[in-house]
Image (tube, rainbow, N blue to C red):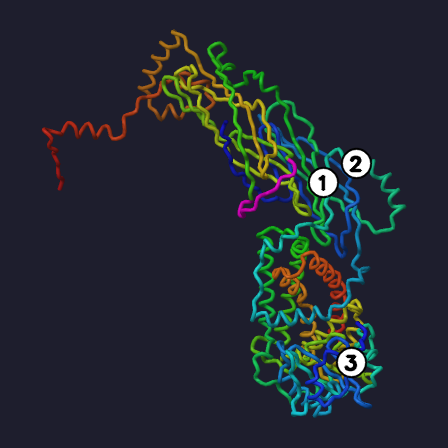
Amino acid sequence: MREVKEIQMILEDPEFSWHILEGDCETWLVLRGRKRLPDCEINGITQIALERFDWEIAAEAARRALLQGELGFRVSCGIVRLDTLRAHCSARAEEEALARELMLRADRCGFPAYQPEACAAACATLFADRLLDARDIRSMDEDESEEKKEEESETELSEAVVFVLPWRAWLNGEGERQKPRLVKVHVAQTGFGSLLLEAVIRLETRVGDGTQIKPEAGTCEAAFGEKGEQHRFLLEDERVLGLKERDAERIIEVEEIVGLTETPVYTTLNQKQSGAFCLLDSYIKLGVIFITPRKAEERILVAGALLREEKSLAGRLLPPAPPVLIGLTRQARNIVMAPGNKLLWRSETICSLDYEMHTEKDKTEKDKTEKNLHKKDINKTEAAPATSVTPLPLLSLSPLSRPKPGEKYLRKAAARKTDGLYVISVRK
Amino acid sequence: MEGATNSGEGLPAQVLAAYGLDVCGGKKKKNYRLLEKGRESILVAEYSAKKGYPAQAIKWQNYLCGKGCGQVLPLLKTKNGGDLCECEGRLFLAARWPEGPAYFETGFFQPENNVQLQAAARGLAKLHGYDDGHRPEDDRGLYFFRPSLFQDRLTDLLACRRSIKKNKAGTDFERIFLENFDSLYDQGQAALQNMILAGYGADGGFPCALLINSFTEEDLFIHEEEVIYLNLSESAAGPRLLDLALLIAGYLPRHCWDAELLFALIEEYARHRLLRAEDKYFLLALLRFPSRLWLYAYQYCQAAEDAAALAERLKGYLAERYWRDLGLSVLETRLREV
């Protein structure tokens, strides 16, 4: 049975007014807004209607675009005005007396320490909490006719709270840019008269199927044509992801996974000169956007982790020179909920190593260039502009043999060694 | 309020003997029994011996009665000449009832009645007026008021908030507490500042007296349109206005903090006992202090009370606070004009 590694994801604190989870070819945005209704108590959420969803491309760069827009919701909720709450103004004489008694004598017994386990035992909330899929949210036009009917039937006071949530985020990756899509909306009463709205938007760039990878611009095949050679491997990985809060040991429960992002951070290949043994070492920033079952608070949360993938490519017949480019293309990925409040992440990645292949003619030219290169000042070589076209000889340089640590001194010591005696020179 | 029950039962024979009573029938309400002895009616009050009845309170009651104060009942002496009788872990005090037995059912204080509320404020002022010659003795158990204590209570609230925030609000009580903390805390700070500005500083330079400190409906009795304070067992020492503040904070919520009534109560008190401008501001500060928020936080942290029930009480407090702030702001404006 294959061993599945477990790693801990760290929960990010919910950010206002938006929380961005950026990945390769997709960006998730959690927009958050809070409203406090003055002098009234919220008594249920009756309707959530989408008022507007505008967006535009604000700027475009080589491989990414800055999108911005505004999302507007109208949340209707039942309210009870405080000036009608006379019933609450009942007998308080005993409580006032007790408060006085305890307040002025508490220096003798002290204020009790907060006990999170005991206090949080009753987690059930009486506050309203609604979580909707995008398809369940009505637009304003649909909503108006319905509302008129309700206004006729209901005599209770209701208040329409308007949330306008502006946003702006980068979308990485090349390909066909998709229209920003509203995925989830969560509205909750978080206090006596407070409302919280969370909305998830997905920005996406659609790329071709991972199984048919075409040489991208800048790859070895594109640059060298026939001279390029690409080696591809399918890498499989599976991890169990645990979730916990940053400063607390509390385990976070997951009700639903909304999205997953993966961003390659760093990839390197440790290759033996013979090419017989290769170790692919890569770091991936993983982000998960999920929904917790805890109501009346921020429920759409983001957790992240930095994954290290070490894959041995032993036994592959690879060219002895290091590859010019290392490409990782996610073929398939999946994240599912696992028992014990854990997530199971599976991925299949195609690793492509692009090599530059040399003909005999190239080799003689290369030798000449190498000789010339040794004569050149190293600083000058380094100062060459980064955009200069393919410094071919440099790329094909075989790794220099390094002396062993302390070899020079060991050699000197060996030369001084005579008949088992060491010569010690003392300087004054 | 519960009705009186026909029961003189449960009263130990030693108590009857100690007071020379040979009757057993009578009426009972809360911890009070009205026993009939010929044409006379005797009120017997029962207290827990564990909690005790402060000796100073008895001394004070005797002093007030000696001065002719009609706001307390003169205590009956036991056969041994004592003021109280201890029996079976209970303490008993007896006093002569000034009205007929029928009045025992209807004569108790009704806080919904504005006239009776004003009578309570008037009675308090009269009682405080008799008090000038009687200073509390140096009994540390009775001295409790220090403005710094209010500061400590605000610190308790801050610590509680920090703990709740750290552990993430998990209950409705915690959510409401955090939602309203800032405004209530600011009111507490302003109240504390006003106390100091009114001269009630940490140096204790304020007039200190014995306080009744308990105004539950069953402990107040109306006799000839005046209020009689039956229970002095909770008495403590401090600025006299603490008593008036407790009376107002206890019963004005039932009147939705009616600014007119609030002003009338203060005026009624001031008619019989001088209130300086500083005293009025001190009273305002006491009324504004979020003492019930502190009480609920205390009970919540103790985990002795159901969190959901406490959340409901906190909601009630916030609703009441709306009326309180309205009433107090009107009062403050009028105090400035005066």
Q: Quadrant of residue A166?
A: top right
> How far apart are labels 1 and 3 at the CA level?
56 Å
User: Which type of secondary structure does the marked residue at label 3 adopt?
Assistant: strand
Marks 1 and 3 close (CB-CB < 8 Å): no
Q: Residue at x 56, y 17 (%)?
A: A213
Say which of B144 and A64 sits in front.
Answer: B144
Magenta residues: mostly which secondary structure? loop
User: What residue is shown with label 3?
Assistant: B221
Q: Position of residue B80 (x, y in %)?
A: 65, 92
Badge 1: few (under 14), some or many (20 or more) residues near its Cα, within 10 Å?
Answer: some
Looking at the picture, tell me which residue is in the foreground, A195 or A52.
A195
Q: Which residue in the protein does label 1 denote?
A: A131
Q: Amino acid at mark 3?
A: Phe
**x, y percentage for residue A317?**
42, 14
Magenta span of residues: A245-256
Question: Which residue carries the number 2 mark?
Answer: A139
